[in-house]
Amino acid sequence: MAFQITILPSQHVFQAEADEIILDAALRQGVVLPYGCRDGACGACRGRVLSGQVDLGQAQIKALSNAERSAGFALLCCARAHSDLSIEGRELLSAQALPVKTLPARVQKLTRVAPDVMLVELKLPASERLQFFAGQYIEILLKEGRRRAFSLANAPHDDSCLQLHIRHMPGGQFTDRLFSTMQERDILRFNGPHGSFFLREDSTKPMLLVAGGTGFAPIKAIVEHAIAEQSTRPMAIYWGGRGRADLYLLPLAEQWAAAHSGIRFVPVLSEAPESDHWQGRSGFVHAAAMHDYPDLSGHQAYVCGSPAMVAAARRDFVGQCQLPETEFFADSFELANDHQSPTAG
């Protein structure tokens, strides 16, 4: 049995089978809704059910609070229809829907940029290019149908190689192999691009970009894309880690700020050991951004990091700094089970 789903305010209509995830049904029929990794871990795919009944599925409490559930919100990446539905939610323009491909790639270069972070460069076949937006991610395909998702750290114009920043998760099926036996010239297969986290180029608002750890990867892609496009939008970049080693490409970020008057860069450490001799900002990275930008009513915010950091940034930027909720874009990096993808819904 199929149910009719109406998305407001666009009035686009599609059909969903009773056992079908609403997001899957929408994408299958060309209705492009925001999403991240599709596991209910954050909330980029949040929509409000105005009429009808849904099964919320595996939506996690950190991504969909009890108050939000009571108010009728659902995560469309894991919700199923139990009747015809009207849902209020954001929708991406059809022109923003890029073809998703499954491609082989050769490991071109492996660079350990921190004790637990590997910079991986993947070379596509000579006849292939991957079209993507700055900030999106790909899924590495493993045996038995398993996938591991990682954000692309390179800008779309710099696509001779795809760059990933991968943190080692001990016991992880993919990262254990990456940090022990994987070699340059090995062949991997991937699927992508995925995700609705990317630079909104139709806006002229100043950008606040906040990264935690390897959440720097998609932020790097966005910044380098904006630079290549000669964007005049001011960019304030905050990158946080526990210790100095977590800011594994610190000179690059400092170089952006030195070379471009519209870019401000602030590194922040939360647990710097004495051996780091850290003289910079300390504490939570999103709190440092709030201190410097108490009024975000005229900004866009792009946030990548742990689920806890992303949730705190969303709550505080919107609740305390007057950031419009529609101008908050995020991917939270769920590190459990060897999965370092954006998990924003």
Image (cartoon, rainbow, N blue to C red):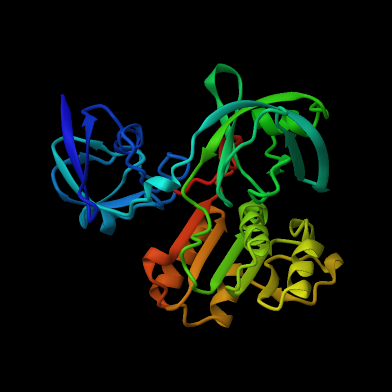
Q: Position of residue 235 (x, y in %)?
A: 61, 72
User: Residue placed farthest to the front in the image?
Assistant: 127
Name above or below for residue 104 compared with residue 263: above
For the N terminus, the quadrant is top left
Residue drawn at 53 percent across, 20 percent down: 145
Q: Does any portion of residue 307 appear in the rendered image?
A: no
Q: Judge from the rendering whether residue 312 lies leftward or rightward of residue 242; answer left or right.
A: left
Q: Quadrant of residue 266?
A: bottom right
Residue drawn at 81 percent across, 26 percent down: 185
Seen from the viewer's position, the closer of residues 186 and 277 is: 186
Name above or below for residue 62 compared with residue 78: below
Seen from the viewer's position, the closer of residues 167 and 102 is: 102
Q: Judge from the rendering whether residue 32 lies leftward or rightward of residue 129; answer left or right.
A: left
User: Residue placed farthest to the top in the image?
Assistant: 144
Name above or below for residue 129 compared with residue 233: above
Count of residue discs:
0
Q: Position of residue 123 (x, y in %)?
A: 74, 33
Residue drawn at 54 percent across, 61 percent down: 303
Q: Position of residue 328 (x, y in %)?
A: 44, 64
Name above or below for residue 6 compared with residue 207: above
Q: Quadrant of residue 188?
A: top right
Q: Does any portion of residue 19 appear in the rendered image?
A: yes
Q: Position of residue 190 (x, y in %)?
A: 61, 29
Q: Judge from the rendering whether residue 263 lies leftward or rightward of residue 328; answer left or right.
A: right
